[in-house]
Image: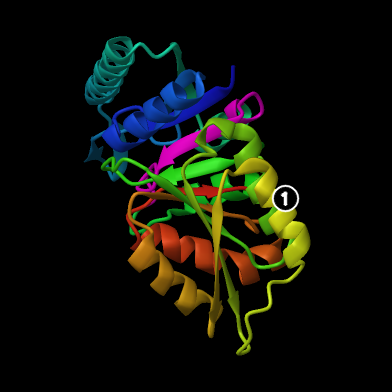
Amino acid sequence: MKRILAVFDGAKYSEGASTYAMELCRATNSILIGVFIHDLRYVNYTYAYAWDQPVFDFNEMEQSHKEEFDKTNANIALFNQACDEKGIPHAVHFDKGVPLQEVIKESVFADVMIIDADTGFFSFNDKAPSSFLKDVLADSHCPVMIVPSHYLNFRKIVLCYDGSASSVYAVKMFAYLFPELQKLGTTVVSVNQTQNSHLKEGKNLKDLVKQHYVEANYEVLNGNVEEELMRFLKQEGEHAIVVMGAYGRNALSRLFHQSLSNRVIKELNIPVFITHH
């Protein structure tokens, strides 16, 4: 039985993350761990000035703290109720601390993590994916699936392949984690910057894909990698889970490989499975 994490800002329950996680658990007979995080980096407070010095209103601080806890407890109740209604084996972790640290710690013991694309934890003026989410993608100890706030049932899989070991690793990890989804319609998409239909290491790739998927189609596009893949996903990505690799930990990898996955998350309302080699 696999261990799937659904990560929430404790005070902001995501129906999308919850539903995607439950549907994947139901399809794969997995256990769902709801991780609700209370951010202790920022304590909401009001204060007045006396003799040019801030005077903290501890009553306001306590009230704000209680309101956050009440919201989180209400969201946990919603999560438990939804799991019970769908017959999903589940548990809840209420983590209090620095969100990134808490999420990375939880990821050590998980097979895959599911999180809403809009999750930010006080990442003001951050467009999706937030700085928090980018750090999660780079540092997580398990694959991460970024999902939209509103659930759309998935009926197919798009495997993004660029010839790199990282993209192959992502294909393998998705197959190992979700063998029950192998009968879904599957497309392997690759983009060549030159005008040819050559698929790098095509024989090896097709042998690998054939081992895990009943039937897969191959699309080799030509042109600018980012623009062509975005165009393809806008046309064919509805009701799909997109599988991508190359979200590395080092600075060079972040500079050259993350812009595409960030753009997919930002512009397309589809779940994206990302891992790093």
Q: Is residue 112 magenta?
A: yes
Question: Would you place residue 217 above or below residue 176 in this image?
Answer: below
Is residue 174 visible in this depiction of the protein?
Answer: yes
* Magenta span main SS: loop
Is residue 142 visible in this depiction of the protein?
Answer: no
Left or right placement of residue 26 versus residue 76 in this view:
right
Left or right placement of residue 116 versus residue 197 in this view:
left
Q: Residue at x 64, y 42 (%)?
A: 212
The amino acid sitting under disc 1 is: Leu
The secondary structure type at the circle numbered 1 is helix
Question: Would you place residue 81 above or below residue 147 in this image?
Answer: above
Residue 122: give x, y in percent of width and height. 37, 45
Residue placed most toward the observer, 10 or 164: 164
Q: Which residues are magenta?
A: 106-123
Q: Residue furthest front?
A: 215
Residue 244: give x, y in percent of width and height. 57, 55
Q: Residue at x 22, y 25 (%)?
A: 60
Residue denoted by label 1? 208
Q: Quadrant of the N terminus?
A: top right
